[in-house]
Image: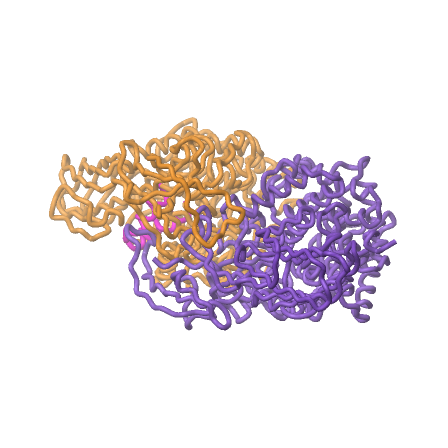
Chain colours: A purple, B orange
Amino acid sequence: MHPLLTGLTGGPVRPSHGLLRPLGTDEICITGGFWAHKQRVNSEATLAHCEEWMERIGWIGNFDRAASGTIADHHAGIEFVDSEVYKLLEAMAWELGREPDAALEARYTALVARVAAAQEEDGYLHTSFGRPGQPARYSNLEFGHELYCFGHLFQAAVARLRTGHDDVLPQVARRLADHVHAEFGPSGRAAVCGHPEIEMGLVELSRITGDARHLEQARLFIERRGRGTLRSSSFGPFGDEYFQDDVPIREAETMRGHAVRALYLASGALDVADETGDTALTEAVAQQWANAVGRRTYLTGGAGSHHQDEAYGDDFELPPDRAYAETCAGIASVMLSWRLLLATGAEQYADLIERTLLNNVLASPREDGRAFFYTNTLHQRTPGSVPTEHELSHRAESSLRAPWFEVSCCPTNVARTLASVGLYFATATGSGVQLHQYGDYRIDTQLDAGRIRLQVRSGYPFDGAVEVAVLEAPDAEVDLRLRVPAWAAGAASLSEQPAVDAGTHLELRRVLAPGDVIRLELPIQPRVTWPDRRIDAIRGDFAVEAGPLVMVLESADLPAGWSVNEVEADAASIVAGADGPRVTVTRRADPDAAWPYAPHPARTEREHHTARMIPYHAWANRGPSTMRVWIPQAE
Amino acid sequence: MHPLLTGLTGGPVRPSHGLLRPLGTDEICITGGFWAHKQRVNSEATLAHCEEWMERIGWIGNFDRAASGTIADHHAGIEFVDSEVYKLLEAMAWELGREPDAALEARYTALVARVAAAQEEDGYLHTSFGRPGQPARYSNLEFGHELYCFGHLFQAAVARLRTGHDDVLPQVARRLADHVHAEFGPSGRAAVCGHPEIEMGLVELSRITGDARHLEQARLFIERRGRGTLRSSSFGPFGDEYFQDDVPIREAETMRGHAVRALYLASGALDVADETGDTALTEAVAQQWANAVGRRTYLTGGAGSHHQDEAYGDDFELPPDRAYAETCAGIASVMLSWRLLLATGAEQYADLIERTLLNNVLASPREDGRAFFYTNTLHQRTPGSVPTEHELSHRAESSLRAPWFEVSCCPTNVARTLASVGLYFATATGSGVQLHQYGDYRIDTQLDAGRIRLQVRSGYPFDGAVEVAVLEAPDAEVDLRLRVPAWAAGAASLSEQPAVDAGTHLELRRVLAPGDVIRLELPIQPRVTWPDRRIDAIRGDFAVEAGPLVMVLESADLPAGWSVNEVEADAASIVAGADGPRVTVTRRADPDAAWPYAPHPARTEREHHTARMIPYHAWANRGPSTMRVWIPQAE
């Protein structure tokens, strides 16, 4: 059987009925430029960094101690650290699929062996529960994260399978999935996990193995949720909404509660909807996506404005200085948008993927890939401190990127996302190829009429010129679709005509021949962006974007002693510069008042300075600084 | 000995060296009007409400179970619920001092007896620690709140002593203070409590009993703090700043960390500074007060803009929709400002007391005194839900006032504050009387030259006319000082001259005679207030104040179906109305956009409506609603 038909190729998700078909590591690969650099830092620094940290602080050792029966009083870390090991395994699997490497393969195999050794007879595998001296299995469904961890193990196994290896971890996953079915299946306990995640893993396992029980299990988890199911077992300090257990997902109107939970749940629901043909569920999630994107999302694509419970705020409650915008929520948002893109083919989803990846997600890793932002503020008021390289951080808001966290979901999530990021760049149908993201990458896949090979080249996101060179093409008409980001609508130009301008994309339909080069030009010069007036926190402020990049003003680009808190600017002063936009800022020497509220706004001395702006994702790489995305429009 | 000299009269705090002398319940009493109504609701509803709740859910019963040896597995509530009982006792004591009542006296006595029965042989008294089956005493100084609870017991005892009774609770307090000295004194463990509070209680006990050990103990607690003292014993998830254990108080520049902790600590430090003549410490705290008031305080006087850790934010980080502004922080702010007023005589402190009491603190209790806001937002975006009358609430942000909370510090804090609120209205010196707050109240105290009796009358805060009628006066010149709030500076008029206009107050110096009436007129018509431009979250918005009251726009005063989120107004449209200011608001029918950031601000349809504004403290008494203090200035 052709590997495309077995499900044993493709990316993290491979819908059975979507309009677009994702490509696997054998079909698309990044070949250079911006993204190749990010992937290189990820493979050369971040993977080892994650492994070394988890070895040193005992999170990997938990599996050894579980296997040897010594875990009871010697579990390291909180109850979902298993999932960090699984996300690292997933990252390694994608990395190995992308570029085989014997040394990494050996590390991967050794790590899998330690995980596998901890699996119990009946398939259960978690280092925090169930062994003598530990809390009982499933005694804390609300916060225990057992099924959540299983989900990450399943996703790691899927990555291994989709990169061509049906070896140890997939076997562990199958046994674990059987256990889940026995425990939580139609005749098991009608419960759900406090943190959605397993649903996605179960559907993908089902897609690969053809075992319908796993799909049904995922469906049950989706359908049971939203009915106070968790609260009936224990008591939730944040309320049902936090867990999306307040309203069934097909009845909800928007994303709410804990952002990562909400977005993982919605992603899993789409997977179930795809397999069961439940278009009503797909439409419900698409509407929730639209409402959240239109009212509850930061300019960077970040989601979640509450620190307290890592949750979405109310509509238009998007304070830049208290943006939580957790890195994992950005990644989860990419996962959701990707599923909607595959299901519907609508490029609005690719737009948000681009925005979220290039701004919210990429802001997390430090340039060297060895420290990470957990939260991604849009306004840093005070220069953060620099965490020491060997200290475990809280998800501290007043620090710069930290090497590791007590709750360290973000670094490994970044690692697995960057290792597989190219898989989000393009898709195929029987008749053509759709380019959703731009950079340097090669496509090599099968259309109905035959093999097609394309080389895409672009200095994107800093250069708006995109070249698509045809290396090989079938002797038949091919649909070539190129996304036009919303910010470029009406301003994109293609090197040849006729092309259909569908607003969100340009489409060519013709026979392609090796040597053909199609050129797309996107306008990436700086532009001013204003917020909806209902976003109270930034009314009267503007932002600067350049192509897909959100730009920031960082104090490192201001005269010594200035902070971003005291400046304003005229949006009309924005000009393009050689290394980024320039803005003429005005420093208000505001007098210190005994009381900051007065009958008349203060009149103050002013100084001016023309400052460079840099991409949001690149801030905080020059030491402690203040930073802002939204700049007050000068009066 | 004259009672004034024994410390056995006066209010909650009685400095030895302050410029102004506080008055006791025998010297000042509210006689009618706005405040009498609030005190009546407090005495007739709130006290019984608190007692009934704590009886029903076992918080009072904890003492019985501790006494009978059955507490181990049967402690109700979190580890600082003892303090709620003590704050209720303090409230009862002030109430009994204000107005003797045999039935309340009997309830008080019975409750004290149950508390006293739980005291251990060595003086220790806490229902969560130290008995068989419980965690060891002082095993969790960071979050155990043992010394914090003791502090509240001391303050309750002080209220009993200052209202003329040296009976059971003061005896319990003395024994407990002896225990604290033995355990934490100069030769004891060099530790502090995670939550400051005991410092104030110890100094007051020392002032009453003359026992210098208690003052020294308070001084030690103040001086030990700020050196990572807590962290050395355990690990703080919020960091040292949360506990004010990051910087010694005499070196700190502003209020920071958990707001109630910060303000209680500063209050205790001032008490120590007063007794030890440590003017450097007083000046340090006064500077911290000034920096926090100028940069970290809401228009309502509320303090604390972070939900996550109930903490102060950075300078000018004052989001109205995420204002935490905990009721207890407002009360703690009043306690701090009161001490600074007594120490320095500067009326800026009385200004903040007025603002905080009338807005932040009074917003907490529902009109009937049986439900409370824990947090006091300045912008309610979605109509809150109504908690059921018999359910224990989290300190939920999406609900209206709740009858009781799992962490229920606010209701009892409101109770003790309202029971004693008149004691904050005026002070005396040897030569005169200072009126800091206005309302209907009577003063009867001794000056150097003899007895003085005054009747103050005012419809304040709704009417700016204040009458001071002399009932009795010594046959000598008297200084009569009347505060002029900052918002009335230059616009207050006095019925007689010559008076010294000191900006913050008017001062008469003459021989007073019975029958004399002095009239002060303050301008209370509505006025527009603009924020410092550095408060990003409300730049371009204005607020309306009327006299000492912050006004709000509540959806109950808008046409059906309108929310406050979609309106703006021209500040020039504010006019006075018979029952409050009127503002002409414009509703923007903002189109729902797929993405709320755009190259050009949206132009929208508009509707207009003239709406009443009501006092902030009175909002949310007409069912679920949206509300905002800060109104966007129309473009």
Q: Residue at x 80, y 60 (%)?
A: A163
Residue plotted at (75% across, 45% down)? A17
Q: Is residue B34 left or right of residue B374?
A: left
In the displayed structure, does residue B156 sit left or right of residue A493?
left
Q: Within the magenta stretch, is there residue B332?
A: yes
State the image coordinates of residue B272 (x, y, percent, origin top left).
40, 56
The answer to whether A45 is drawn above or below residue B117 in the figure is below
Q: Is residue B212 visible?
A: no
Q: Which residues are magenta?
A: B331-358
Is B460 or B382 nearer to us in this picture? Answer: B382
Residue B303, position in %: x, y?
42, 50
- Decide which of A177, B274 is in the foreground and name it: A177
Position of B323 relative to B269 (above/below):
above
Above-or-below relation of B161 to B310: above
The location of residue A472, given as percent across then percent down, is 75, 65
**Residue at x 38%, y 51% (from the top left corner):** B336
